[in-house]
């Protein structure tokens, strides 16, 4: 059956979509189809703008007809309306399956109502956002109440030590906190409770934290789990203190301590919108009042501008990296920029002007206008842009009830969005969108953004343009290059000619070729002025070739001559850096920020930056998570290498930072893997641990354990757990604890080692675990201890000297450290120990050392494996630690060779002079190894180099083992 004549009111591009749905609609029973006749125009519009609406109309026509005939869609609901409706339905929920089913069916009906009113009836944006927020609050609070009652029957009700009854407090962050939830948004929550204590009134009691953790876990499942009826709201808990690695529920005291002592600038920004939405709301608001000094400073806080600027720059770099300029939230001129403009004033002045301490964006914008902090015209433009962007966000999400802010790439989808926005077609809608985004970007630049460097205009590039264009003869080109400072003029000319004549350049699209033709003369002139070698030129041309199909990188360098200068310098000095940037051109963006390029962040800043990046990725976005982790590692190792070249970091600091980067990534990967596994199988069963206690730890050996990472180091890891092997996980799909931890370990290795388009993160070596490759992937702490006491070889105890816990549960980490100390401080037979260490060293030398040439001389010296090298020093340190730790336990407190050597000197086992000499030589050998790694060269030097130092090490070896 053909659609009504009103079909012609819509763009022809979407006629087939509307017609398809209309034909299915017309196949409904005649009496139902006829009853819809007063609403045919609205039905037609619903088909035009939303698959979500269309499918519910077709699958549940009686429900939709009842909805339309009752005129519910004409009435604004209040919070009490949602509460009353859901409470009545949940009165029939006698078991948890009933709870989940009723919540999901209620949400689907209410979201149909909301999206119908938004896209078909065109109600005001604020009405839609408010009603979706009330719907979420209702579902959270009613589900919480039901689960609380159910859990209390089993464990009793929580009370403080003083006997006061306790309730969970749920804080909503982000858009829900501000009552600005969009039509397909997740909800950011934090769980907290007033005081510690325990439950009362049941045979079995729990401490309050354990009770509220279980309550929170069940609530998340009730809302987030996807069943045959769908889900209610996706729940994101990553904004809680310590993120994924933090406890699921914290006491008020712990919350206050965290924000006072460890709160970050971005957490101030997040807390602006925090609001208690369920549980003990009054207590929650009291907590938020106590946290206001963290969010709002008493003075005018101009540092907030820089903090938000840094956050925006980080987001911009991610947007560029992911190609998200079409994202109306985080892209240029998007919602995030508008919010930043308002929130910078809140963070700057909110401590002194309480009227700015508001959660809702539009209310705060009005206040800024009233206070004269924003010009009337600017406020009006930002208001218009914000409402337009939020409406188009609803139109995009309402298409299929999906959480996305990306402008559709499909032509039909774009036309449907335009119709939902009230435009005759996408062209008109896009024009208005671009106009408003340009306006937002301009205001953002005026208030927050730093002006970028102006492109370099070089009037003397005529000859260089001619060289690139091939208009110079060989002699003319050689003369230009030679008199400009190039010593290898012919080689450089031939390389440039080869690139210009390559098929990839010849077949470039117009815009890309124009960018290349603008870039190459500047590059060639800059190369000549820096007296670059042919090798440097070759490295840079390899980069040019790598980005020919992604010419935005060429535009970036054209617009930022300072970045080009840094690029040439780094490529000239370091083959390793050039390889990294050629294989990952995204790293070019790091050159725009020389402040951070030559100032690697400390451990806490690293963790904070990675946590922020991962927060902007959906929980189920595995591919995005893996790419973000890989880029994070490459970007930060690049910063260390750049600082190393500039000699702003000494050797020990280089290794420290490379180790910090690895630890930060391992911690994040463990958290990501744990969350995935728990979601799938539930938590492992424990006999004595509280819920949400990971009871799993990662132990670093070798260079990671010894805080001596280099640029190409792999990770030597051992996994330990502290759960009973007789118990199982508590999820619907339950598996034995040992199976759970084995799969957890496999997932961690998978996340670290899987080769994506950006490569792997680290290679992982698990051979140092008990029984090596034939042993369990994850051992219990007790099994690890038993193995070390009864079965480990001496070389395994040597390896234990350079081990430490690097990630996971604090209690398991502490248990490992105790086992390590107990094993290393055992009394040993010195004769047997000496013989076994010497035997292992001789085996390694025979296998890995340099073989003499035909004349009997070494062709080169291997810094690590040859006599007098790094391994000799490490073996002496390990031997001395095992030999003397029983008498001097302080020598095995640390896991790095330098501090162990210092401790050996302080204990008198080595003389202070010998210990200092070994430290100096060890640093020297490692520094040479780092420099060779930066040139992509093996750790070898000429046979005659460092002879004095090598001979000293060999002589000291003989002295140490001559006892």
Image (tube, helix red, strand yellow):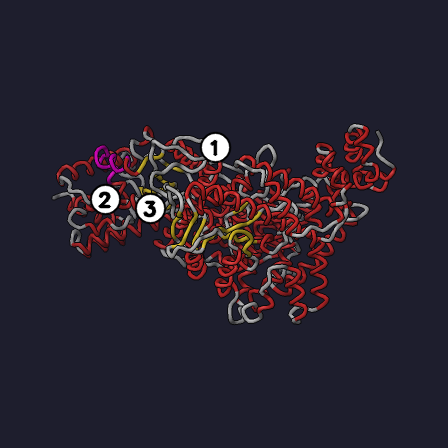
Give the quadrant of the N terminus. top right
Q: Distance of mark 3 from mark 1, alpha carbons?
A: 27 Å
Foreground label between 1 and 2? 1
Closest to the observer: 385 or 55? 55
Task: Indicate which disc, 3 or 1, sits on the residue closer to the N terminus.
Answer: 1
Q: Distance of mark 1 from mark 2, alpha carbons?
A: 48 Å
**Crowdedness of circle 3 by 10 Å Cα count: few (<14), some, many (20+)?**
some
In the image: residue 768, left or right of residue 910: right
- Looking at the rendering, the stretch of residues picked out in magenta corresponds to 783-797
Task: Indicate which disc, 2 or 3, sits on the residue closer to the N terminus.
Answer: 3
Q: Position of residue 241 (x, y in %)?
A: 46, 53
Q: Distance of mark 2 from mark 3, alpha carbons?
A: 27 Å
Foreground label between 3 and 1? 1
Task: Indicate which disc, 1 or 2, sits on the residue closer to the N terminus.
Answer: 1
Closest to the observer: 639 or 684? 684
User: Mainly helix, strand or loop, the magenta region?
Assistant: helix
Q: Position of residue 930 (x, y in %)?
A: 37, 48
Residue depicted at 17% across the width and 44% down the height: 883
In the rendering, which numbered label is found on residue 288? none
Residue depicted at 31% across the width and 32% down the height: 772
Examine the rendered structure and indicate whether residue 605 appears above or below residue 508.
below
Q: Position of residue 296 (x, y in %)?
A: 52, 66
Q: Secondary structure at mark 3?
A: helix
> Is residue 302 in view from this perspective?
yes
Residue depicted at 20% across the width and 52% down the height: 904
In the rendering, which numbered label is found on residue 878? 2
Q: Position of residue 440 (x, y in %)?
A: 68, 59
> Is residue 482 in view from this perspective?
no
Provide the residue designation for mark 1. Answer: 732
Provide the residue designation for mark 3. Answer: 811
Pointer 1 with pointer 2, Cβ within 8 A: no
């Amino acid at each position: 059956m053909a659609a009504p004549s009103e079909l012609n009111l819509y763009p022809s591009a979407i006629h087939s979509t509307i017609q398809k749905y209309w034909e299915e609609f017309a196949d409904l029973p005649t009496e139902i189809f006829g009853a819809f006749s007063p609403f045919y125009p609205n039905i037609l519009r619903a088909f035009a703008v939303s698959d979500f609406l269309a499918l519910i109309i077709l699958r549940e026509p009686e429900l939709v007809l009842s909805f339309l005939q009752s005129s519910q869609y004409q009435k604004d609901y209040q919070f009490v309306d949602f509460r009353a409706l859901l409470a009545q339905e949940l009165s029939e929920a006698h078991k948890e399956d009933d709870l989940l089913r009723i919540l999901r069916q209620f949400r689907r009906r209410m979201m149909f109502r909301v999206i119908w009113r938004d896209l078909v009836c065109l109600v005001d944006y604020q009405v839609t956002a408010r009603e979706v927020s009330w719907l979420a609050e209702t579902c959270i609070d009613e589900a919480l109440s039901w689960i609380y009652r159910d859990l209390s029957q089993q464990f009793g009700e929580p009370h403080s030590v003083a006997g006061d009854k306790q309730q969970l407090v749920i804080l909503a962050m982000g858009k829900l906190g501000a009552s600005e939830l969009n039509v397909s948004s997740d909800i950011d929550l934090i769980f907290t409770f007033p005081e510690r204590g325990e439950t009362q009134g049941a045979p079995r009691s729990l401490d309050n934290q354990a009770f509220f953790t279980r309550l929170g876990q069940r609530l998340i499942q009730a809302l987030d789990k996807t069943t045959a009826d769908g889900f209610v709201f996706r729940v994101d808990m990553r904004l809680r203190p310590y993120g994924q690695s933090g406890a699921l529920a914290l006491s008020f005291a712990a919350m206050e301590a965290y924000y006072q002592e460890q709160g970050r600038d971005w957490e101030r920004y997040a807390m602006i919108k925090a609001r208690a939405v369920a549980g003990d709301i009054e207590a929650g608001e009291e907590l938020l009042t106590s946290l206001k000094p963290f969010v709002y400073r008493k003075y005018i806080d101009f540092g907030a501008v820089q903090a938000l600027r840094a956050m925006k720059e980080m987001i911009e770099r991610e947007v560029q990296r992911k190609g998200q300029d079409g994202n109306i939230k985080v892209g240029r001129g998007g919602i995030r920029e508008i919010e930043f403009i308002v929130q910078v004033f809140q963070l700057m002045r909110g401590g002194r002007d309480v009227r700015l301490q508001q959660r809702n964006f539009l209310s705060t914008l009005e206040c800024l206008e009233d206070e004269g902090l924003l010009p009337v015209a600017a406020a009006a433009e930002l208001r218009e842009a914000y409402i337009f962007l939020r409406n188009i966000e609803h139109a995009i999400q309402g298409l299929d009830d999906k959480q996305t802010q990306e402008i559709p790439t499909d032509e039909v989808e774009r036309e449907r969005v335009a119709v939902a926005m009230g435009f005759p077609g996408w062209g008109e809608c896009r024009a208005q969108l671009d106009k408003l985004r340009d306006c937002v970007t301009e205001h953002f630049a005026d208030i927050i953004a730093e002006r970028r460097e102006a492109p370099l205009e070089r009037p003397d590039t005529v000859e260089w343009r001619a060289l690139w264009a091939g208009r110079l003869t060989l002699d003319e080109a050689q003369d230009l290059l030679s008199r400009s400072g190039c010593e290898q003029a012919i080689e450089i000319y031939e390389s440039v000619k080869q690139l210009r004549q390559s098929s990839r350049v010849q077949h470039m699209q117009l815009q890309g070729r124009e960018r290349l033709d603008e870039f190459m003369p500047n590059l060639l002139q800059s190369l000549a002025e820096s007296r670059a070698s042919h090798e440097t030129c070759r490295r840079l041309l390899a980069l040019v070739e790598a980005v020919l199909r992604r010419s935005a990188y060429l535009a970036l360098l054209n617009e930022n001559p300072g970045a080009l200068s840094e690029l040439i310098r780094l490529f000239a000095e370091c083959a390793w850096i050039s390889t990294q940037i050629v294989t990952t051109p995204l790293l070019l963006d790091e050159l725009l920020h020389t402040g951070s390029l030559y100032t690697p962040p400390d451990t806490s800043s690293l963790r904070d930056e990675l946590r922020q990046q991962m927060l902007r990725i959906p929980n189920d976005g595995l591919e995005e998570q893996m790419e973000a982790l890989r880029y994070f590692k490459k970007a930060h190792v690049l910063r260390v290498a750049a600082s190393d070249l500039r000699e702003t970091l000494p050797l020990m600091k280089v290794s420290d930072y490379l180790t910090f980067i690895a630890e930060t990534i391992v911690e994040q990967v463990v958290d990501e893997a744990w969350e995935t596994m728990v979601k799938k199988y539930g938590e492992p069963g424990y006999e004595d641990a509280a819920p949400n206690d990971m009871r799993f730890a990662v132990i670093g050996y070798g260079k990671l354990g010894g805080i001596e990472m280099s640029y190409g180091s792999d990770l030597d890891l051992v996994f330990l757990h502290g759960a009973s092997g007789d118990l199982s996980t508590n999820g619907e799909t339950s598996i034995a604890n040992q199976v759970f931890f084995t799969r957890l370990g496999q997932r961690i290795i998978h996340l670290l080692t899987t080769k994506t388009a950006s490569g792997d993160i680290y290679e992982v070596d698990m051979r140092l675990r008990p029984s090596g490759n034939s042993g369990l992937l994850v051992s219990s702490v007790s099994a690890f201890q038993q193995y070390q006491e009864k079965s480990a070889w001496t070389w395994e105890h040597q390896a234990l000297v350079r081990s430490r816990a690097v990630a996971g549960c604090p209690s398991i980490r502490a248990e490992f450290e105790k086992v390590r100390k107990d094993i290393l401080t055992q009394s040993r037979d010195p004769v047997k120990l000496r013989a076994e260490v010497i035997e292992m060293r001789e085996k390694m030398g025979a296998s890995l050392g340099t073989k003499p040439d035909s004349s009997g001389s070494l062709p080169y010296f291997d810094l690590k494996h040859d006599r007098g090298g790094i391994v000799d020093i490490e073996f002496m340190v390990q031997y001395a630690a095992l030999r003397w730790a029983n008498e001097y336990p302080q020598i095995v407190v640390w896991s790095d060779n330098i501090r162990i050597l210092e401790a050996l000197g302080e204990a008198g086992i080595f003389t202070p002079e010998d210990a200092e000499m070994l430290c100096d030589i060890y640093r020297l050998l490692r520094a040479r190894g780092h420099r060779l790694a930066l040139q992509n060269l093996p750790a070898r030097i000429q046979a005659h180099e460092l002879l004095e130092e090598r001979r000293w090490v060999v002589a000291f070896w003989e002295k140490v083992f001559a006892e």
